[in-house]
Image (cartoon, rainbow, N blue to C red):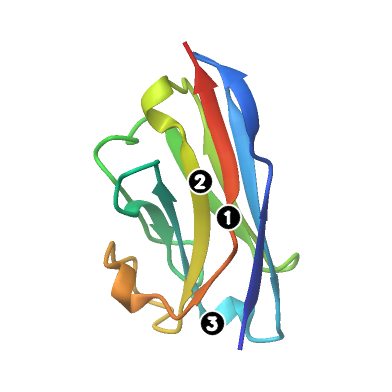
């Protein structure tokens, strides 16, 4: 089992950057792929990015390609989401999630077994 805790959210202005972190507990963290998702008010939760268990493969939603970068440090049981050139449409609660299929970078929410509680990101115009 994996427990996930997100951090790094906050209030920023359009064009600013933020770095989110997802800290995991559990000795088997390195076997999981990790995804970042977000949910804006009144909208469904959507895929943002994912990284496989070694960090060798990543996947991004079209809306964040070229602006967001996902990375992981298995020695620290952590995954990061570097978000650059933020815009108001990026405002949402951001969640990290773990997928026991460590090779997968799927965008499907149903594939992720464990979820964090989320961190709020608000981008003002």
Going by the image, does 75 lie left or right of 39?
A: right
Counting residues from the N terminus, which is met first, the one under dot 1 or under dot 2?
A: 2
Measure the C-alpha gap from mark 3 to mark 2. 26 Å
Q: Badge 2: few (under 14), some or many (20 or more) residues near its Cα, within 10 Å?
A: some
Q: Secondary structure at mark 1?
A: loop
* Residue that label 1 marks: 118
At x 63%, y 38%, the residue is 19
Going by the image, does 64 lie left or right of 11?
A: left
Return the x and y of residue 1 as percentages of the image width and height.
61, 89
Instruction: In the rendered view, tell whether residue 92 sits above or below residue 114.
Output: above
Badge 1 vs badge 2, beta-carbon distance below 8 Å: yes
| Residue placed furthest toward the top | 125
At x 47%, y 23%, the residue is 86
* Residue that label 3 marks: 31
Q: Secondary structure at mark 2?
A: strand
Badge 3 vs badge 1, beta-carbon distance below 8 Å: no
Instruction: In the rendered view, tell whether residue 49 sits above or below residue 26.
Output: above
* Residue that label 2 marks: 93
At x 58%, y 41%, the residue is 120
């Amino acid at each position: 089992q994996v427990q996930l805790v997100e951090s790094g959210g906050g209030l920023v202005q359009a064009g600013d950057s933020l770095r989110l972190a997802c800290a995991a507990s559990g000795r088997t963290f390195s076997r999981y792929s990790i995804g970042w998702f977000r949910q804006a008010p009144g909208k469904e939760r959507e895929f943002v990015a994912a990284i496989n268990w070694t960090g060798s493969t990543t996947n991004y939603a079209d809306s964040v390609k070229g602006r967001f970068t996902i990375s992981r440090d298995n020695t620290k049981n952590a995954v990061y989401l570097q978000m650059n050139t933020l815009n108001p449409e990026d405002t949402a609660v951001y969640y990290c999630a773990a997928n026991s299929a460590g090779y997968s970078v799927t965008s499907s929410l149903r594939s992720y077994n464990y979820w964090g509680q989320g961190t709020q990101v608000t981008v003002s115009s």
